[in-house]
Image (spheres, helix red, strand yellow):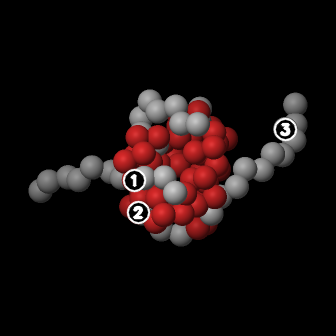
Amino acid sequence: MGTSKFDIADYLDSNEMIAEYLNTVLEEGDDADVINAIGHIAKAIGMTKISEETGLSRPSLYKALSDGAKPQFATIMKVLKAIGGQIQVNPVSI
């Protein structure tokens, strides 16, 4: 019996699951983790759809959201909007 590679994108099948995943990564991860998470979400939704909504080519999206990438903030904002997300700042208790 063979095993298959785990792909989180296979489990991001609702807006609630996507939001929970991204919020967890934002809370616990670093900038590279956030970029990778946005890439997983874009893959789950469909790179073609994200490409159409952002005006960015599919190859550009894959490159911008790959391991080690340093995308521009404008790119991240376009993709967040396309995946139905937004950035919200809440005060942190110290």
Question: In x, y percent, where is residue 89?
Answer: 81, 45
The numbered mark, 2 or 1, whose residue comes first in the sequence reads 2
Question: In x, y percent, where is residue 24?
Answer: 62, 47
Residue occupying image coordinates x 54% and y 63%: 53
Front in this rendered view, residue 90 or 84: 84
In the image, residue 16 above or below residue 38 = below
In the image, residue 53 above or below residue 60 = below
- For label 3, count other residues whose C-alpha is less than 10 Å away and answer few (under 14), some (14-19) or many (20+): few
Cα distance in 3D space between marks 2 and 1:
6 Å
- For label 2, count other residues whose C-alpha is less than 10 Å away and answer few (under 14), some (14-19) or many (20+): some
**Amino acid under label 2?**
Thr
Cα distance in 3D space between marks 1 and 3:
37 Å
- The answer to whether one can see residue 17 in this image is no
**Amino acid under label 1?**
Arg
Camera-side mark, 1 or 3? 1
Front in this rendered view, residue 15 or 57: 57
Residue occupying image coordinates x 70% and y 55%: 86
Residue ID for mark 1: 58
Camera-side mark, 2 or 3? 2
Determine the secondary structure under disc 1.
Answer: helix
The numbered mark, 1 or 3, whose residue comes first in the sequence reads 1
Residue ID for mark 2: 48
Callout 2 touching callout 1 (CB < 8 Å): yes
In the image, residue 49 above or below residue 38 = below
The numbered mark, 2 or 3, whose residue comes first in the sequence reads 2
Question: In x, y percent, where is residue 17?
Answer: 56, 63
The numbered dot on residue 92 is: 3
Quadrant of image for the N terminus: bottom left
